[in-house]
Structure formats: C-alpha cells, structure tokens
Image (tube, rainbow, N blue to C red):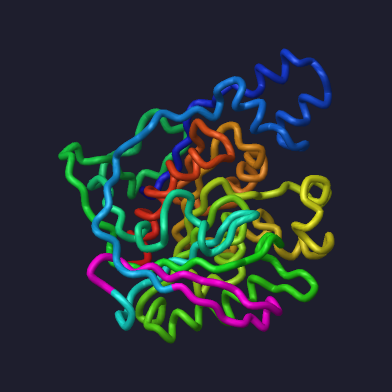
C-alpha cells in the first residue's frame, strides 16, 4: 500500500459546466462558489457502486466523556473506541480521528462508531509489482489483494474522537483546537495507556478533519507516526478560503503559518495516505499537496465527490493503512 495511484480522469462536472456556458456556473463547478455537489448529483459524478468488501468483528467497548479544555475555553466531548478483546486499562497504539465541519466527537466517522471502526476486518494483502496503469508508482512496497478471499482483522489499536469546533483545527482567538489535541486529549489518552511509548499514534480525518490531521502531523512530526486523510479540505490561498469559509482562518498570517501545502516537507519519511474524489471541489489543493508529499506516499484519486459515499468508501483502506503503520 506504499505507492501512488493515479486513475483515469473523470469528465462529468466539466461537461455540465461547458454546456451551461456561464462564468458563474463555471466557478461553481470548480468549487470556487458553493453548489458543485448539486451539479455533480445531476450528472452522476457522485454515484459510486456499492461495495461490500469488509466485515467487522464484535466491537470492543466505548468510553465517552467530557473534559474542560483550557486551550478551547470550553467543555469538550470525546469518545474512545477499543478493539475486540481489549478494554480500559490495556496499553495500545492510538488513532486520533478528526471530524469535518459541522461534526463532533459523536459523528466523526460517517457510518461508524469508534469501536466499530477498530473492529474492521479487511481483505488480506500481499506484495506485488506496481500496476502498469499507474502514471506514477514507487517500485517497492506496492500491494494487491492476494486473491485468496480471506480477511484479516486490524491490528489491535484504539481510536479517539473529540469536539474540535468549526475553526479548521487551527488556532483562533480564544479557541485553539490543535493545542487541545496535543496538550490535553492525547495526554488524557496516554494516561490511559493509549499512544504512550513504545506504542505509536496515527492521525486520521475527513474534509476539515483531513486538513486538521495533516496539520497535526506537520506541526508535531515527533508525536504523529502516520497520517491518513480522506477528501482533505485544502485551500490554495487565503483569499479562496476566506471567500468560501470566512471562519476557516483568523487572518492571512494564520493561513500562511498553517498552510498544509507549504509545510508538507515536515511529512518527509512519514507514512502518508491521501484520497480525494475526481469531482471534489478541494481537488486543486490536494493536487498541490501531492506534489510536496513523500514519493512513497499513497495517493488515490478516484471517482467520487466531497460527500458521505466517498468518505465511507475510503474509511476501510485508511484504517488499514494506519493499522499497518502504528500497530
């Protein structure tokens, strides 16, 4: 699973925009203005075939609670999911899962609870040469399904979710969700035996949370061992971010300090997986980020949009990737 895969480009949304023939429609289709998802729904760009290639063991326990966050100046909720056969008191690797905009600790993983996520069973994989259909691929570490039809559980690891607000996981006046993660949530988990040495910590996120997971790994490379993100909300400029979401960054200086593309060199020598849909409005930012990622990063562009169907399709391979690198 350590290779880049670039699949054939889809035309869907571009065809609709060309037919419309208006500047406004073109801006919508390229994600500069809201509404692209509606266009894609009309032309079928978001339609994904149903897949049933994973199953789950009986989930382990979940622990939910709250703590007062001095970094965020408020009470925040969290949930810790334990893998099958494990529970509170066990020492385990940890995955920190960051929710998207409008989400919270209770719905960070579309369609999954934290305990169910780490009860995942996935197809067994074996080493194989890079696919000839890839336009760019590393010559080592590629994997494919072994054809045996067997499944294997994730290695034992815990997963934690937490309330991060709407500020794109970067510091705003009176609210520092990144400081909450590193100074409060992760230490809370480590006191419970999760993610403490010699065990490792991985970061995962979807949309806004995907950006947050990248930011966490870039800002704290000694803390985060691997990162897997789905449809990360990566802006190409502060002006674009402010035009679409004025609350994403407090000021231009904050965008520059936390720009995931600019600081991607901090991910060197770190396992990275990133997945984005062809018709995701954040694809330009993801493409810019890809150019800065380590050469053996796993990068998958596939059919899909910035929506729940793409998110849920990419959750199992993202969790499997992290399981192979932090457990």
x and y percent of residue 173 in the render?
Answer: 80, 73
Query: Which stretch appears magenta?
Result: 64-86
Q: Say which residue appears at 33% left-offset and 49% top-offset.
A: 141
User: Magenta segment: does it hold 87?
Assistant: no
x and y percent of residue 231 in the render?
Answer: 56, 46
Q: Say which residue appears at 33% left-offset and 45% top-offset.
A: 142
Q: Say which residue appears at 40% left-offset and 81% top-offset.
A: 196
Is 203 positioned to the left or the right of 323 in the image?
A: right
Is 177 positioned to the left or the right of 230 in the image?
A: right
User: Magenta segment: does it hold 73?
Assistant: yes
x and y percent of residue 76 in the render?
Answer: 60, 74
Is 51 positioned to the left or the right of 234 in the image?
A: left
| Number of numbered tags placed on the structure image | 0
| Magenta stretch: helix, strand or loop mostly | strand
Name the residue at the top extreme: 19
Is residue 146 depicted above or below 60 in this figure? above
Q: Say which residue appears at 33% left-offset and 79% top-offset.
A: 88
Image quadrant occupied by the C terminus: bottom left
Who is closer to the viewer here, 192 or 148? Answer: 192
x and y percent of residue 38 in the render?
Answer: 66, 29
């Amino acid at each position: 699973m350590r290779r880049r895969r670039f699949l054939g480009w889809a035309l869907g949304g571009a065809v609709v925009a060309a037919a419309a023939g208006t500047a406004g429609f073109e801006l919508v289709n390229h994600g500069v203005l809201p509404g692209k998802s509606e266009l894609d729904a009309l032309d079928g760009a978001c339609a994904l075939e149903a897949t049933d290639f994973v199953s789950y063991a009986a989930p382990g326990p979940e622990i939910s609670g709250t703590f007062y966050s001095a970094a965020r100046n408020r009470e925040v909720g969290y949930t810790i999911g334990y893998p099958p056969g494990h529970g509170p008191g066990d020492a385990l690797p940890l995955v920190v899962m960051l929710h998207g905009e409008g989400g919270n600790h209770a719905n960070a993983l579309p369609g999954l609870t934290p305990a169910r996520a780490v009860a995942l069973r996935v197809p067994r994989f074996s080493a194989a040469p890079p696919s000839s259909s890839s336009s760019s691929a590393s010559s080592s570490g590629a994997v494919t399904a072994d054809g045996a039809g067997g499944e294997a559980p994730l290695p034992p690891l815990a997963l934690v979710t937490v309330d991060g607000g709407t500020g794109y996981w970067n510091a705003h006046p009176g609210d520092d969700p990144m400081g909450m993660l590193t100074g409060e949530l992760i230490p809370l988990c480590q006191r419970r035996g999760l993610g403490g040495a010699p065990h490792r910590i991985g970061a995962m996120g979807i949309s806004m949370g995907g950006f947050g997971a990248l930011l966490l790994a870039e800002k704290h490379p000694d803390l985060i061992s691997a990162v897997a993100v789905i449809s990360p909300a990566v802006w190409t400029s502060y002006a674009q971010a402010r035009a679409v979401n004025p609350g994403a960054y407090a000021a231009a200086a904050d965008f520059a300090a936390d720009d995931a593309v600019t600081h991607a060199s901090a991910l060197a020598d770190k396992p990275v997986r990133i997945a984005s849909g062809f018709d995701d409005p954040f694809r330009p930012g993801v493409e810019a980020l890809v150019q800065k990622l380590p050469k053996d990063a796993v990068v998958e562009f596939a059919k899909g949009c910035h929506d729940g169907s793409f998110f849920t399709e990419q959750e199992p391979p993202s969790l499997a990737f992290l399981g192979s690198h932090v457990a």
